[in-house]
Each structure stands twice: as C-alpha cells, then as structure tokens.
Image: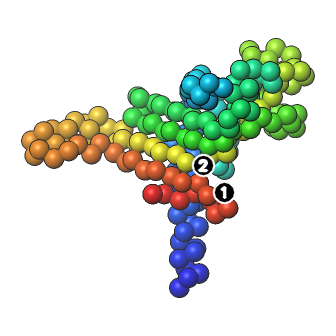
Amino acid sequence: MAKKKAEQKDVGQRDATTHLGELIHGLKVAMMTTVEADGSLRCRPMWTHERDFDGQLWFFTREHSAKVDEVEHDHHVNLSYAEPSKDRFVSVSGRCRLVLDKEKARELWSPTLKAWFPNGLEDPELALLCVQVEKAEYWDMPNSRMVQLLGFAKAVLTGEALRPGDNEKVQVDTNAGISVH
C-alpha cells in the first residue's frame, strides 16, 4: 500500500511538473524580480528559453550586470509570466545562481540572442542565470470567452462568487520533485 501511495505521489509530481511546463511553454518573456542591496525589489523583462521544464529555468545575461549583483547578494527571485489573450498567468519563485558554462550556453543558444550579444558565444560577458524553481502558482482560465461570460452571468444571478478557472499552488521539493497544493 505504501509503495502504491509513493508511486501515485511521483505521478502527481510529474504531472504537476509537466503542467507547469505546459503553462510556461510559449510565454517568451518573464518579468524577473530581484532584491536590491537595500532590500527594495527590482523587476525587469527576461527572455525564457524553450526547453522541456525540469524544475530549472535558464536566462542569458551579462556577467557584470546589476541583476547579477542583486542575485549574488540575495538568491531569491520571482518570475511572472502572463498571456492575457489566453487568460494564463504563472508566478514562479526560486533561487537563482550565476552560471559561467560555455557548453550550457552553446546548448541554449539561439541566433536571436545576437541582438544582445553581438559576438555570439565568444562574447566575454556572456553568462547564464539558472533559477531552481521552489514554488509556483498559476491561474489558468477557460479559453472560451463564452464560457467565461456564462460563468460571470451565473455568478451575478446566483450571488455565488465567480470561479473563473484553475488556480493551484505548486511546491517544489528538490529531493522529491513537485507537488500540488
């Protein structure tokens, strides 16, 4: 019985990881929030690289940049993804680290990055930020506007609160994977 529960938990964690990856897939830009030395929050757009989600998110950056200084001071970051036209919103938090690995950069490289790194993979400032996801929360509404309008009308007519779609919190256990709460 314990083995079956453990297997169900593993399947649930894989499903949550897959679903989180599906929600992020295609959302090119994340707003990355870092903590400045004085404790204030700073947010900037970052380009997300298309790859199978495995609990880590990767971003190209310049080695000597303010965001790297902020991440080295406080590793906590938040990434916010939004696709309003699809009513899809994802908030991811985790710990970020600077990675200086030319092989990993080569693996993730895309020709569009030349706009930021004109010297390509040979750019001496080229670096990566890796976010190890610890928690996530998502809001995934039905794509059909008609379904949303019917739900809104029902809420108004019945006096019940509108429940527009799925909202889940996801906890990442680096030893056991991802679980949904």
Do the CB atoms of the residues marked 2 and 1 lie less than 8 Å apart?
Answer: yes
Instruction: From this view, report whether residue 144 is shown above or below residue 174.
Output: above
Q: Which mark is residue 134?
A: 2
Q: Is residue 97 left or right of residue 40?
A: right
Which residue appears farthest toward the left when viewing the image? Answer: 157
Residue under the point 86% across and 16% down: 119
Q: Earlier in the sequence, mark 2 or mark 1?
A: 2
Q: CA distance from mark 2 to mark 1?
A: 8 Å
For the C terminus, the image quarter is: bottom left
Q: Tell me which corner region of the image, top left, top right, bottom left or bottom right, holds residue 113.
A: top right
Residue 25, x across and y down, in percent: 57, 39
Q: Which mark is residue 118?
A: none
Instruction: From this view, report whether residue 124 is shown above or below residue 51.
Output: above
Which residue appears farthest toward the bottom when viewing the image? Answer: 1
Residue 45, x across and y down, in percent: 59, 23
Secondary structure under the numbered disc 2 in the rendered image: strand
Q: Is residue 20 left or right of residue 149?
A: right
Which residue appears farthest toward the front when viewing the image? Answer: 38
Residue under the point 56% across and 26% down: 41
Q: Which residue is mark 1?
A: 174
Residue 14, x across and y down, in percent: 58, 60
Q: Amino acid at mark 1?
A: Thr
